[in-house]
Image: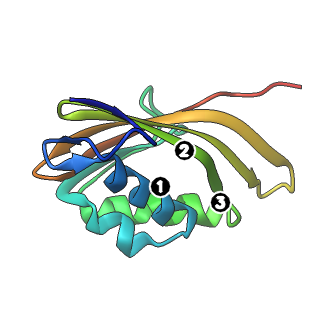
């Protein structure tokens, strides 16, 4: 099935648009416990930045918790604004506009998305992408 936010609560593999909305809300509330409760035990978080081609990669609940906490420590006022969600089978996407203040005091505002893989009604993989602004 394929769904878009605002067009009902379509379900694919027990993950719904409402579920992704709740996941986005947990990120905006900086609620690490709620975020992790929606992810599998062996979850994977691939961040937008890091030393490798995939950014920084965290695997398993303990490591993913550390990755999430690093995001919130780096950007204490981080928000993912205007999320729009799509689901197709066991995959999904959330588009957003990220706003935050960096550790250097510079304001960040960029468009991005998360690409999800679902398993057993939860998020197994969250792979994050965002634009890089210049100037």
Instruction: Tell me the element at label 3.
Output: helix
Q: Nearer the viewer, residue 113 or 135?
A: 113
Badge 1 is on which residue? 24
Residue at screen point 40% across, 60% down = 22
Q: Choose top left, top right, bottom left or bottom right for residue 91.
A: top left
Of residues 130 and 82, the one nearer the viewer is: 82
Q: Label 3, on which residue?
A: 74
Q: Which mark is residue 3?
A: none
Residue 83 is labelled as: 2
Q: Is residue 113 left or right of residue 73?
A: left
Q: CA distance from mark 1 to mark 3?
A: 18 Å
**Contact, CB < 8 Å: mark 3 with mark 2?**
no
Query: Which mark sits nearer the N-terminus, 1 or 2?
Result: 1
Relative side of 120 to 45, left or right: left
Q: Nearer the viewer, mark 1 or mark 3?
A: 1
**Mark 2, other Cα within 10 Å: few <14 / some 14–19 / many ≥20:** some
Measure the C-alpha gap from mark 3 to mark 2: 21 Å
């Amino acid at each position: 099935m394929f769904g878009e936010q605002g067009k009902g609560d379509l379900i694919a593999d027990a993950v719904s648009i409402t579920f992704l909305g709740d996941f986005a809300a947990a990120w905006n509330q900086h609620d690490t416990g709620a975020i992790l409760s929606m992810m599998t035990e062996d979850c994977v978080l691939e961040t937008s930045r890091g030393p490798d081609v995939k950014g920084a990669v965290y695997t398993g609940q303990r490591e993913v918790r550390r990755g999430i906490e690093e995001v919130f420590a780096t950007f204490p006022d981080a928000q993912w604004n205007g999320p729009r969600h799509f689901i197709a089978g066991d995959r999904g996407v959330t588009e957003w506009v990220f706003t935050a203040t960096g550790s250097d005091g510079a304001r960040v505002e960029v468009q991005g998305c998360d690409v999800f893989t679902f398993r057993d009604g939860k998020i197994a993989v969250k792979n994050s992408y965002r634009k890089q602004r210049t100037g």
